[in-house]
Image (tube, grey):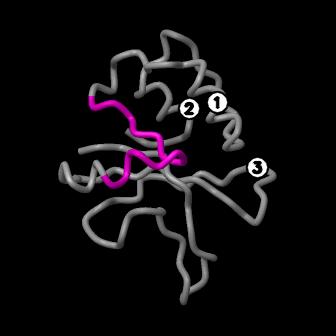
Amino acid sequence: MRRYLVPRVGTGTPRDPYRAKYFTPGPEQIVRALTRAHAPKGAAWMVVSSDVTAFDQAAVEPHPDVFAFPRDLDAPLADPTGLQRTLTAYGLAVSITARTTARQLLAALGVPR
């Protein structure tokens, strides 16, 4: 199971429901929608948990607007300074340090266990 922070697309109407960018409806589970404060054009982000193949992983992870959580949720996050800049640019008011783990970041984003 992999977790990703990805942009939310769609308008939230029955004809155009909210969904995770780069993921088609299917086996993935939308864990938590994250509304971005003061987002231009109603942008928002979602945390997605998904069983992905290596092929799907290679297709999703290179996008600059995707953050792939590490498989080991209890390890400290790599490049916390860069990740902090990314989260701030996304409008997500979450503070991280060199000791912050992925599990702590998910909790700070409001994602249930």
Question: Of discs 2 and 3, which sits in the foreground?
Answer: 3
Mark 3, other Cα within 10 Å: few <14 / some 14–19 / many ≥20: few
Question: Of discs 1 and 2, which sits in the foreground?
Answer: 1
Q: Which mark is residue 94?
A: 1
Circles 2 and 3: CB atoms closer than 8 Å: no
Q: CA distance from mark 3 to mark 1?
A: 12 Å
- Give the tally of numbered discs: 3
Q: Residue 26 placed where, x, y %?
A: 28, 71
**Residue lying farthest to the left in this orientation:** 53
Report the amino acid beneath label 2: Ala
Report the amino acid beneath label 3: Ala
Mark 1, other Cα within 10 Å: few <14 / some 14–19 / many ≥20: few
From the viewer's perspective, tell me whether residue 80 is left or right of residue 24.
Answer: right
Q: Which mark is residue 108?
A: 2
Q: Residue 3 placed where, x, y %?
A: 36, 44
Looking at the rendered image, the quarter that the C terminus falls into is top left
The vertical placement of 2 against 24, above or below, is: above
- Boundaries of the magenta span: 59-71
| Magenta segment main secondary structure | loop
The vertical placement of 14 against 32, above or below, is: below
Q: Residue 90 placed where, x, y %?
A: 67, 43
